[in-house]
Image (cartoon, helix red, strand yellow):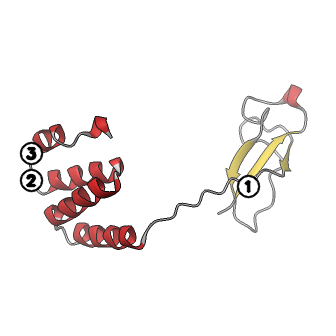
Amino acid sequence: MPIYEYQALDVRKACHRCRRSFETLQGLHEEPLTKCPLCGGDVRKVISWCRAAVAETSGESTRVERRIKEYETSGMWSHAAELADKHSEKVKDKNLKIRALDNYKKAGYDVNFLSQHANLNNE
């Protein structure tokens, strides 16, 4: 769903939300907002700068992510944890390291012991 930007027609009568521009998710075929969802004041859709974020992942990362998900879906927590742990070290991904620790916990490992060695604060 696209993100649209709106602002108040009269900032003197606007709430803190619509006084400045605010964004909202709307379907392509939905009518534009005419009222602020918070205060009911009149708003108009504005043309905003394109703020698209493109995150490119390598083919290897995509394959690893898919494999981790397969292990998790199958309940093979230790396999998922080990793969996520190894790949997180390679790509320096803190979120993947946390996911690995979560999977280790689900597999029955002592996460407190493992997290001491994860160097989460040094990454």
Say which mark, if any, is on residue 64: none
Distance between the Cα atoms at labels 1 and 3? 46 Å
User: Farthest right residue?
Assistant: 10
**Quarter-wise, where is residue 104 in the image?**
bottom left
Disc 1 versus disc 3: nearer the observer: 1
- Name above or below for residue 93 compared with residue 84: above
Disc 1 versus disc 2: nearer the observer: 1
For image coordinates 46% across by 65% down, the residue present is 57
Q: Nearer the viewer, residue 95 or 87?
A: 87
Q: Residue 20 appears at what percent x and percent y?
A: 78, 34
Q: Nearer the viewer, residue 18 or 51?
A: 51
Q: Earlier in the sequence, mark 1 or mark 2?
A: 1
Distance between the Cα atoms at labels 1 and 2? 46 Å
Circle 1 residues within 10 Å: few <14, some 14–19, many ≥20: few
Q: Amino acid at mark 3?
A: Asp
- Name above or below for residue 77 compared with residue 46: below
Q: Residue 101 appears at what percent x and percent y?
A: 21, 50
User: Farthest front residue?
Assistant: 90
For image coordinates 60% across by 56% down, the residue present is 53
Say which mark, if any, is on residue 108: 2
Say which mark, if any, is on residue 50: 1
Which residue is identified by label 3? 110
Element carrying mark 2:
loop
For image coordinates 10% across by 40% down, the residue present is 113
Q: Amino acid at mark 1?
A: Cys
Q: Do the residues bearing badges 2 and 3 touch, measured as CB atoms within 8 Å?
A: no
Q: Residue 13 appears at what percent x and percent y?
A: 86, 28
Q: Is residue 44 left or right of residue 112?
A: right
Q: Is residue 17 left or right of residue 67?
A: right
Circle 3 residues within 10 Å: few <14, some 14–19, many ≥20: few
